Image (cartoon, grey):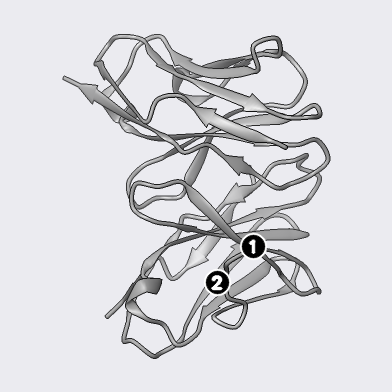
Amino acid sequence: AQSVTQLDSHVSVSEGTPVLLRCNYSSSYSPSLFWYVQHPNKGLQLLLKYTSAATLVKGINGFEAEFKKSETSFHLTKPSAHMSDAAEYFCVVTPSGTYKYIFGTGTRLKVLA
Amino acid sequence: GAVVSQHPSWVICKSGTSVKIECRSLDFQATTMFWYRQFPKQSLMLMATSNEGSKATYEQGVEKDKFLINHASLTLSTLTVTSAHPEDSSFYICSAAGGGNYNEQFFGPGTRLTVL
């Protein structure tokens, strides 16, 4: 069975410092993995996706993630946090050949001035 | 990129009335659409999956007669909350997939439903 675990429900960082949001997955087959961001009362915006191409994926707004099969991880990073990065972040896995998403429980990122 | 719209963005209704939410894929043909519900500070909960021209597949615990889903065309799906009650108040988000976009769903901006 497929599953996603976001290891931190809340993360606080100071503006200008690095961001690390952790995600581990379980999937029987070659999965696709996504990171989405959600601002309050808004829909989901795609940050980046992994679909079995390069393992280091670069996304929008300076975010990137590395697919590590041996660790079954897909952690999201950003070198320098900005106040506008404060939001909820969701890691998603979808098994190969299906559109169905399996969501993580989300990580709320707080950026301190 | 693919764009999905939802209408209305927010709605307030009285208990016992029905509310319809529309989800449209604006620039691609969506063979599959999904409806999610999101409670405050929680993740998205899949309610149902609909394929164009066929009946929706509901997740366990979701009442089919309460949440009517229609996917009549490749660009439009509707969710009707029938006989709404305050406990149906929530944030409803749709997504669409298809058009050759491998494995990816495209999300609408969401609809905030408040039932008085």
Q: N-terminal of the two: label 1 or label 2?
A: 2
Q: Is residue B11 visible?
A: no
Residue occupying the point 30% across, 30% down = A86
Residue B66 left/right relative to A3: left
Q: Please name the amino acid that badge 2 sits on.
A: Glu
Residue occupying the point 34% across, 46% down = B41
Q: Please name the amino acid that badge 1 sits on.
A: Glu
Point out residue A34 in the picture as x, y percentages from the top left corner: 60, 31
Point out residue B67 in the picture as x, y percentages from the top left corner: 56, 76
Residue wearing tag 1:
B59
Q: Can you tell which mark lies on residue B22? A: 2
> Viewer-nearest of labels 1 and 2?
1
Can you tell which quarter of the image residue B62 is in? Answer: bottom right
Q: Is residue A59 visible?
A: yes
Residue occupying the point 81% across, 29% down = A29
Q: Nearer the viewer, residue A95 or A79?
A: A95
Residue B54 left/right relative to A7: right
Vertical placement of residue B104 versus B6, above or below: above
Residue B90 left/right relative to B2: left
Describe the element under mark 2 as helix, strand or loop: strand
Q: Give the farthest residue toward the bottom.
A: B16
Describe the element under mark 1 as helix, strand or loop: loop
Mark 2 belongs to which subunit? B
Mark 1 belongs to which subunit? B
Can you tell which quarter of the image residue A19 is in? Answer: top left
